[in-house]
């Protein structure tokens, strides 16, 4: 039986629904499902293009490892990234001191891709593959409009929440 998530930009009041890809990414799906709900400051990608995401404390134990990876996510992909502390704590990335990006334990990045032509490459580290663990089944168009609003008007005060549907 399929399992679903609701992903919400809380301040903007916009949600979408995503189906977990249990067959393609079983370890990642289980780790995320067991850790829900997860919520944190919303960010819009600087380098990857059409992506919104949140950084939360690492929750997978053990870490799921690579499964169903991509460096070219498509619209509707929901992606898990596990980062070590040294990977994203560079001040050039624009995170506030004290954010999850600077945690000595690293961070988990839960991301939603809403448009085409994404490329997961980091100037400091190279390719950044992520695990595609869900696909948006409802509400992508509204979420894409809200994500564009984040890009144009800023993310301050916005949170992104992942919850069981």
Image (cartoon, rainbow, N blue to C red):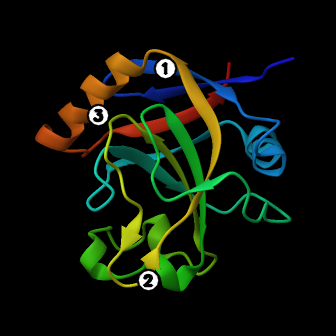
User: Which element carries disc 3, helix, strand or loop?
Assistant: helix
Q: Which residue is mark 1?
A: 16
Q: What's the residue at 77%, 38% (across, down)? A: 33
Q: Position of residue 84 (x, y in %)?
A: 60, 78
Q: Quadrant of the N terminus?
A: top right
- 107 or 51: nearer the viewer: 51
Q: Earlier in the sequence, mark 2 or mark 3?
A: 2
Label 2 near label 1: C-beta < 8 Å? no
Q: Position of residue 86 (x, y in %)?
A: 51, 86
* Crowd class of label 3 (few under 14; some 14 to 19; many from 20; radius 10 Å): many
Cα distance, mark 1 to mark 3? 12 Å
61 in relation to 143, above or below: below
Q: Position of residue 13 (x, y in %)?
A: 37, 19
Q: Residue furthest left?
A: 152
**In the rendered image, which quarter is residue 75 located in?**
top left
Q: Position of residue 73 (x, y in %)?
A: 47, 47
User: Which element carries disc 2, helix, strand or loop?
Assistant: loop
Residue 37 in sight from this viewpoint: yes
Q: Which residue is mark 3?
A: 147
Q: Quadrant of the C terminus?
A: top right
Q: Which residue is mark 2?
A: 125
Cα distance, mark 1 to mark 2? 31 Å
Label 3 near label 1: C-beta < 8 Å? no
Cα distance, mark 2 to mark 3? 26 Å
Q: What's the residue at 33%, 17% (across, down)? A: 142
149 in relation to 141, above or below: below
Q: What's the residue at 19%, 43% (across, down)? A: 151
């Amino acid at each position: 039986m399929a399992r679903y998530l609701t992903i919400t930009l809380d301040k903007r009041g916009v949600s979408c629904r995503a189906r977990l890809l249990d067959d393609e990414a079983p370890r990642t799906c289980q780790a995320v499902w067991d850790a829900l709900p997860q919520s944190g400051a919303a960010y819009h990608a600087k380098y990857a293009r059409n992506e919104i995401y949140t950084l939360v404390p690492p929750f997978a134990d053990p870490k799921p490892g690579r499964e169903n990876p991509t460096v070219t996510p498509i619209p509707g992909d929901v992606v898990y990234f596990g980062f070590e502390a040294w990977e994203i704590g560079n001040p050039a990335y624009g995170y506030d001191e004290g954010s999850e990006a600077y945690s000595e334990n690293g961070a988990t990045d839960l991301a939603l891709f809403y448009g085409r032509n994404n490329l997961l490459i980091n100037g400091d580290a190279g390719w950044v593959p992520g695990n595609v663990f869900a696909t948006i089944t409802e509400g992508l168009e509204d979420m894409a409009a809200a994500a564009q609003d984040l890009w144009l008007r800023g993310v301050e005060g916005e949170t992104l929440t992942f919850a069981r549907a």
